[in-house]
Image: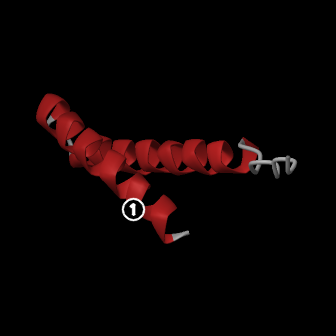
């Protein structure tokens, strides 16, 4: 769970900085931070949930 939060922060903060630089609006930056961080967390979480475990190889 902590890994997902860190991914959300790693993606969200740079996106918010870019939005703040472009729009000069703190509200747009906060909205971008929330949305991009949430999407990054959901994307990674779904990817981890969908990847099947490595099946055991048969001996021999």
SS for dot 1: helix
44 relative to 20 in the view: left or right: right
Image coloring type: secondary structure
Q: 39 above or below 8? A: above
Q: Nearer the viewer, residue 18 or 10?
A: 10
Q: Farthest residue toward the front?
A: 60
Q: Residue at x 65, y 49 (%)?
A: 48
Instruction: Say which residue label 1 marks.
Output: 6
Q: Position of residue 36 (x, y in %)?
A: 42, 42
Q: Is residue 27 left or right of residue 23?
A: right
Q: Position of residue 19 (x, y in %)?
A: 23, 35
The mark total stands at 1
Foreground residue, 26 or 2?
Answer: 2
Residue drawn 82% across and 52% down?
Answer: 56
Residue sitting nearer the eye, 42 or 18: 42
Task: Look at 87% across and 48% down and name the residue there.
Answer: 58
Is residue 34 at least partly visible in the picture? yes
Q: Residue furthest top?
A: 22
Looking at the image, residue 59 lies above or below residue 20 = below
Local packing at callout 1 (Cα closer than 10 Å; few below 14, some 14-19, many 20+) is some
Is residue 30 among the parts visible in the rendering? no
Identify the residue at horizontal 19%, vertical 35% (top origin). 18
Residue 24 coordinates in the image, percent (x, y): 13, 37
State which quarter of the image contains the N terminus. Answer: bottom right
The outermost residue toward the bottom is 2
In this picture, is 47 found above or below 23? below
Q: Is residue 29 left or right of residue 35?
A: left
Q: Position of residue 45 (x, y in %)?
A: 62, 51
């Amino acid at each position: 769970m902590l890994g997902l939060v860190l991914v959300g922060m790693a993606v969200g903060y740079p996106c918010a900085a870019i939005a703040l630089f472009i729009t000069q609006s703190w509200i747009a930056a906060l909205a971008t931070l929330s949305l991009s961080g949430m999407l990054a967390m959901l994307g990674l979480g779904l990817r981890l949930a969908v990847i099947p475990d490595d099946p055991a190889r048969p001996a021999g």
